[in-house]
């Protein structure tokens, strides 16, 4: 038998370099290598060489380094995934921009608005795409909630709520002294701040009040730990939002959102692993999720796939994805709320967000019933 010739697409995959081979960096690497067909993991860099070697062995990556500059200088790398510690984020975005590389960066985009602004200016000057890892936007239930909001299901938003309760243990937080001060605002609740901003399109946060304490590990409070927090955010359209977090939910990883407005309410999220529930003599029981990469497994993959599509469109001069990823304005707005909450928790006073940074909406306001187009 002689094979028939069948034409196939010769599209080149988007080649990505990973900077940071820790927990979430390794998961992103697996997504690129195994779950996103039009992408290829080209290189990995991390100062911890054994971690790089182990990840490269598992995923079949040949290019490894302890220096991010090697990845940034590689002409065969189209874009980088930044999963290094937060203190390096802004610097790496700027370095990637100078090297002409698109960047996907984990949150937060920076430790201050000023350093994030410098990175975003470098990216704009270089004409590169920068997306940020606010994965709840890509979770099926949160995305469905946003579509309902866009369709007018809640009317004008009035009350919003977002919460994050990290999975815990009966013995409390392991090594609480290793948790950096401000983590609950800059690395945990920043997801909730972005979610609230995103579910209230066209509005910006104007005032923040935060209450926080070390209720799970009170012995670590002197070192700066805050493991429990409630933050109230007032928006430019009058809506009032509440974000809360705790580092030790014994029942599982619990992330939820809610928007109530003039026409109704939408909700999203929860700790259930699936919809199966048992009803027995022992009571009602349902399995819960314990890891972020399980609860948001598909969302983590979807956000990277969206970034890859944007990079490929820019490289090939084709149509960009219709929906926008979480960009610089989104990252900046969420960071400003996190910094305002940090200041409020320290002083006990409400903080005007304008004292942190002047903000602008990331997208147009909703057109609800009674609005004039």
Image (cartoon, grey):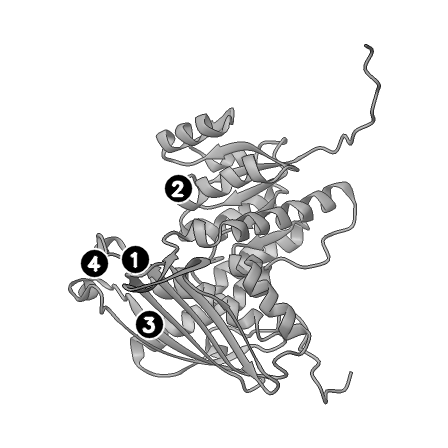
In three-dimensional space, the C-alpha distance between marks 4 and 2, rounded to whole angstroms, equals 26 Å
In three-dimensional space, the C-alpha distance between marks 2 and 3, rounded to whole angstroms, equals 26 Å
Classify mark 1: residues with Cα within 10 Å, few (<14), some (14-19) or many (20+).
few
Secondary structure found at label 1: loop
x and y, in percent, of residue 227 in the image: 28, 65
Q: Is residue 283 above or below residue 109?
A: below
Closest to the observer: 290 or 24? 290
x and y, in percent, of residue 238 in the image: 55, 87
Residue matched to label 2: 22
Q: Residue at x 46, y 63 (%)?
A: 191
Classify mark 3: residues with Cα within 10 Å, few (<14), some (14-19) or many (20+).
many
Asked if the residue at tag 2 contacts the one at tag 4, i.e. Cβ–Cβ closer than 8 Å, the answer is: no
Earlier-in-chain disc, 1 versus 4: 4
Residue matched to label 4: 170
Label number found at residue 180:
1
Nearer to us: label 1 or label 4: 4
Q: Residue at x 64, y 45 (%)?
A: 308
Query: Is 350 on the left or on the right of 174, as rendered?
Result: right
Classify mark 4: residues with Cα within 10 Å, few (<14), some (14-19) or many (20+).
few
Closest to the observer: 115 or 142? 142
Closest to the observer: 269 or 198? 269
């Amino acid at each position: 038998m002689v094979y028939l010739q069948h034409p196939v697409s010769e599209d080149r995959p988007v080649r990505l370099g990973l900077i940071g081979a820790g927990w979430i960096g390794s998961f992103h690497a697996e997504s690129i290598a195994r779950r996103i067909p039009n992408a290829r993991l080209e290189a990995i860099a991390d100062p911890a060489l054994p971690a790089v070697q182990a990840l490269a062995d598992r995923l079949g990556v040949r290019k490894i380094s302890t220096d991010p500059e090697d990845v940034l200088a590689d002409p065969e790398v189209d874009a980088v995934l930044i999963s290094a510690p937060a203190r390096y984020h802004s610097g790496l975005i700027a370095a990637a921009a100078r090297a002409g590389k698109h960047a996907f960066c984990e949150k937060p985009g920076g430790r201050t608005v000023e350093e994030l602004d410098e990175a975003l200016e470098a990216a704009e000057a270089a004409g590169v795409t920068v997306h940020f890892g606010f994965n709840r936007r890509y979770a099926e239930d949160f995305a469905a909630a946003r579509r309902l909001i866009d369709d007018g299901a809640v009317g004008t938003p009035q009350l919003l709520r977002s919460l994050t309760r990290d999975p815990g243990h009966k013995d409390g937080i392991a090594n609480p002294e290793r948790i950096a001060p401000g983590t609950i605002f800059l690395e945990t609740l920043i997801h909730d701040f972005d979610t609230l901003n995103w579910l209230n399109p066209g509005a910006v946060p104007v005032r923040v009040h935060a209450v926080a304490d070390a209720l799970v590990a009170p012995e670590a409070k002197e070192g700066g730990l805050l493991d429990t927090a409630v933050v109230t955010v007032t928006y430019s359209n009058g809506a009032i939002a509440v974000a809360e977090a705790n580092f030790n939910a014994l029942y599982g990883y619990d992330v939820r959102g809610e928007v109530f407005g003039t026409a109704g309410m939408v909700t999203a999220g929860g700790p259930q692993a699936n919809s199966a529930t048992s009803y027995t003599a022992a009571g009602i029981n349902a399995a819960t999720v314990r890891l972020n990469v399980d609860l948001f497994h598909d969302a983590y993959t979807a956000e990277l796939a969206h970034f890859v599509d944007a990079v490929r469109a820019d490289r090939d001069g084709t149509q960009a994805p219709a929906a926008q990823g979480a960009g610089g304005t989104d990252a900046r707005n969420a960071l400003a709320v996190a910094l305002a909450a940090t200041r409020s928790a320290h002083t006990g006073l409400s903080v005007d967000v304008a004292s942190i940074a002047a903000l602008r909406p990331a997208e147009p306001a909703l057109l609800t019933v009674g609005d004039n187009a």
